Amino acid sequence: MKLLQPRCYLCDMPIDNQQPFLCLLCQQELPYLAIPHCRSCALPQRKHQQLCNECQELPPRWQHLITCMSYTLECQYLIKQYKFSQQPQLHLLFSQLLSRSISNKVIQHNYSLPNALIAIPLHKKRLAKRGYNQAQLLAQDLAKKLQIPLIAEKQFIRAKNTKAQAQQTATERSHNMHNAFHVSNAITAKHVAIIDDVVTTGETMKAACETLFTAGIERIDIWCIARTLAD
């Protein structure tokens, strides 16, 4: 028996593999994204078509939304541990899973990687309270794994200390995110991917996209750990 042998975050069984967060069984049973799914919103659909009917009728501001999991109970638990329980090391697990999904898009669907990555920022007050920005840690890992430049934190900031989006109505979420972001230094990349942990209604991403488009960026994709199953 090894001293301080790691235990699985989900089932608490001792694990002895190269990935020290989940046992092999729990890793296999994660809620990986259903296929087929829409290119732009990542929600499951019955037909193998790039865009669902809703995104054809009202296209989102971004082109591709790439995620690795649906936001079900197991995934919720892991992400809440990552964000709220001082478990920043989980970025290593999430970046591994997400980079695999991105690489599959490149190989299977001829997806064009962006010129740069940019993390959804935290307001300075929330950052001081939490101690780290979970999206920034994830973006740093993905930048290294995929060899893509990462936009500096000081270039894209959260100017407004928004309320948590959970438990708010769609209208409240939209109002909450109005003028939330600011580009403080010029961004030269024309195609970027925004990195975050979870996409729910997409209001945070809409607000970020509007700010970045105004700053001169021409194409935006979204990369996230998980996507809620319903808007």
Image (cartoon, helix red, strand yellow):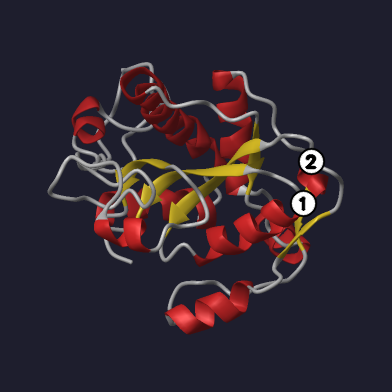
Q: How busy is the neighbourhood of tag 1: few (under 14 within 10 Å), some, or many (20 plus)?
A: some
Q: Nearer the viewer, residue 127 or 198?
A: 198
| Label ID, residue 215 | 1
Tag 1 secondary structure: loop
Left or right of 128: which side holds 220?
Answer: left
- Name the residue: 27% across, 53% down: 52
- Name the residue: 30% across, 62% down: 54
Specify the farthest residue to the left: 46
Q: Nearer the viewer, residue 33 or 128?
A: 33
Residue 8's spot in the image, x, y percent? Answer: 31, 35
Tag 2 secondary structure: loop
Residue 72's spot in the image, x, y percent? Answer: 26, 55
- Residue 168, visible in the rendered structure: no
Q: Which residue is mark 2?
A: 187
Q: Is residue 4 above or below residue 209?
A: above
Left or right of 170: which side holds 174?
Answer: right
Residue 56's spot in the image, x, y percent? Answer: 33, 56
Residue 224's spot in the image, x, y percent? Answer: 46, 45
In the rendered image, which quarter is residue 93 located in? top left
Q: Are marks 1 and 2 in contact (CB under 8 Å)?
A: yes
- Name the residue: 69% across, 36% down: 190
Q: Nearer the viewer, residue 22 or 204?
A: 204
- Residue 195, visible in the rendered structure: yes
The quadrant in which the N terminus is found is top left
Q: CA distance from mark 1 to mark 2?
A: 7 Å
Left or right of 33: which side holds 68?
Answer: right
Specify the farthest residue to the front: 57
Amino acid beneath label 1: Ala
| Label ID, residue 4 | none
- Name the residue: 28% across, 52% down: 43
